[in-house]
Amino acid sequence: MTFQSSVRRLDVVIPMRFTDLLKPEAVFSSLRVNSKKQLLQELCERAAHVSHLPARQIFDAVLHRERLGSTGIGNGIAIPHAKLAKCPSIIGIFARLEKPIDFEAIDASPVDLVFLLVAPESAGADHLKALARIARVLRDPGTTAKLRAISDPAALYAVLTQEPASHAA
């Protein structure tokens, strides 16, 4: 028996699984950037290819959100995000940086694992659920250790999208 992986609302697909947030072609390893701004520009360029939205529009929305407060959540992790009116669905881009950069994170630690999330303005609570799901995956010490040890994008994708182990006996 399989469950429906998404729900349609007003022509917006709302992701229900991590694999709906992130596609294999949206995972990048050893990304070379020197600053937070350069990182955000690079991620927004890559999100533009996936979403077919203008990179500048994505960048402006993400930068606007960053001005409200850094999305660096600590332990070398950042989850920049934004909502856009014309975004067709919730889109994720993951990057492991070649070397950590200052991201003005809440713990002042440099960031090396970044998950960009772009969502439709109409996503509402589903945007927050997606952010919570990403944070839950990236806050797991075992997962982050694996992500930092892997340089192959396909292997990074596999780690990010693996289903949690069942606690059923």
Image: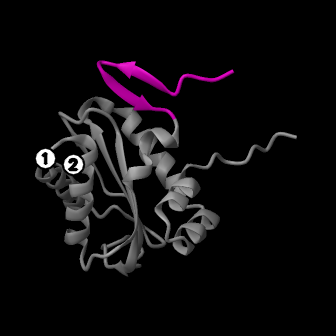
* x 43%, y 42%: residue: 21
As for residue 55 lying within the magenta part, the answer is: no
> So how many labels did they put on this image?
2
* x 33%, y 79%: residue: 101
In the rendered view, tell whether residue 87 sits above or below residue 100: above
- Give the residue type at disc 1: Pro
Location of residue 109 in the rendering, given as x and y in whole percent from the top left corner: 41, 79
In the rendered view, tell whether residue 9 sits above or below residue 47: above
Name the residue beneath numbered marker 1. 54
Position of 146 compared to 72: left or right? Answer: right
The quadrant in which the C terminus is found is top right
Q: Secondary structure at mark 1?
A: loop
Q: Residue furthest right?
A: 169
Q: Quadrant of residue 120?
A: top left
Q: Nearer the viewer, residue 58 or 129?
A: 58
Position of 73 compared to 118: left or right? Answer: right
Q: Nearer the viewer, residue 21 or 72?
A: 21
Tag 2–tag 1 contact (CB < 8 Å): yes
Mark 1 closeness class: few <14, some 14–19, many ≥20 residues within 10 Å: few
Inter-mark Cα distance, 2 to 1: 6 Å
Location of residue 158 in the rendering, given as x and y in whole percent from the top left corner: 57, 54
Question: Which range is magenta?
Answer: 1-16
Q: Secondary structure at mark 2?
A: helix
